[in-house]
Image (cartoon, helix red, strand yellow):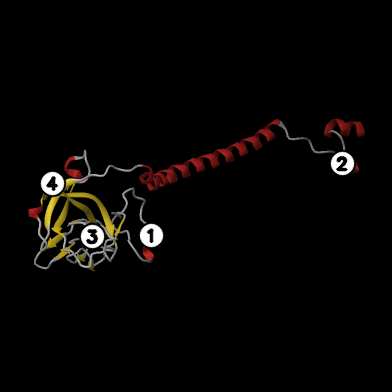
Amino acid sequence: MADAADKTNGSTGDGGLPKPDPPGYFEGESMSRRKALTVAGQAVGGIAGAVIVLPAVGFAVAPIFHRPQERWESVGPVSRFTEKTYTPVVFTLVDGVGEAGKTTAYVRKAIPKPPFDETQPYEPYVALSTRCAHLGCPVRFVSAAGNFICPCHGGVYDFEGKVIGGPPVRPLDHFQTRVRNGQVEIGPRYSVTSQLEPVRARDPGEYTGGIWNIIYPPRPDTFPAP
């Protein structure tokens, strides 16, 4: 009987009970397949996550490694602009895309404010962007009221471009200005705080000061504030 048990069930263990048979070929293959499927699933999940995350990271850090060329364009002689009102000018903001690369700015001669603070850059002309700081709709200057009005959501800016009504989160953006050979030239765009202090250019809806600027930091940009 003992010989028959050994032939049938293999060697016996403690207490005379037969030892379990080792995993057969198909059982071992089943375990390997399960592990392979698990690894494959993890790999697919990792690839899918990378596809989502990497473009977002690239979009955020790309401006740090790529600095666009600083561009200046003449918008007219100095005699064209006065201190009392704004003159709309059209100029090229982005080269190589035709009319789509053009934008409008409102330009006037700057009014010196004594005592002049030498720590702040002085620009002889003021050039305000027509893009609303709320969602980017085009604003227009209403000379009768001396204000800028956004028709989309009721944003209102005063003569200097400061917010006096509606949802905009900051004043209108500025463009750098200079005079060359009697011509007023417009350069890179920059944003300003509520006190008109220059900071790096922001996108519509981005803040330039206060706690909200910490909670919602601006997208990296390569053009420093003037």
- Tell me the CA gap for discs 1 and 3: 19 Å
Please identify, in this view, whether the residue under mark 1 or under mark 4 is nearer the observer. Answer: 4
Q: Quadrant of residue 167?
A: bottom left
Give the residue type that dot 1 points to: Tyr
Q: Position of residue 74 (x, y in %)?
A: 14, 46
Given residues 151 and 15, the one toward you in this image is 151
- Tell me the CA gap for discs 3 and 4: 28 Å
Q: Quadrant of residue 54?
A: top left
Of mark 1 and mark 3, the one earlier in the sequence is 3
Of mark 3 and mark 2, the one earlier in the sequence is 2
Please identify, in this view, whether the residue under mark 3 or under mark 2 is nearer the observer. Answer: 3
Of mark 1 and mark 4, the one earlier in the sequence is 4
Quick one: quadrant of the C terminus? bottom left
Give the residue type that dot 4 points to: Asn
Given residues 225 and 104, the one toward you in this image is 225
- Residue at 11% x, 68% y is 145
- Residue at 16% x, 52% y is 104
Crowd rating for badge 3 (residues with CA inside 10 Å; few <14, some 14–19, many 20+):
many
Q: Which mark is residue 216?
A: 1
Give the residue type that dot 3 points to: Leu
Res 127 visible: no
Crowd rating for badge 1 (residues with CA inside 10 Å; few <14, some 14–19, many 20+):
few
Which residue is under mark 3? 172
Which residue is under mark 4? 181
Which residue is under mark 2? 17
Of mark 1 and mark 2, the one earlier in the sequence is 2
In contact (CB < 8 Å): disc 4 and disc 2:
no
- Residue at 84% x, 32% y is 8
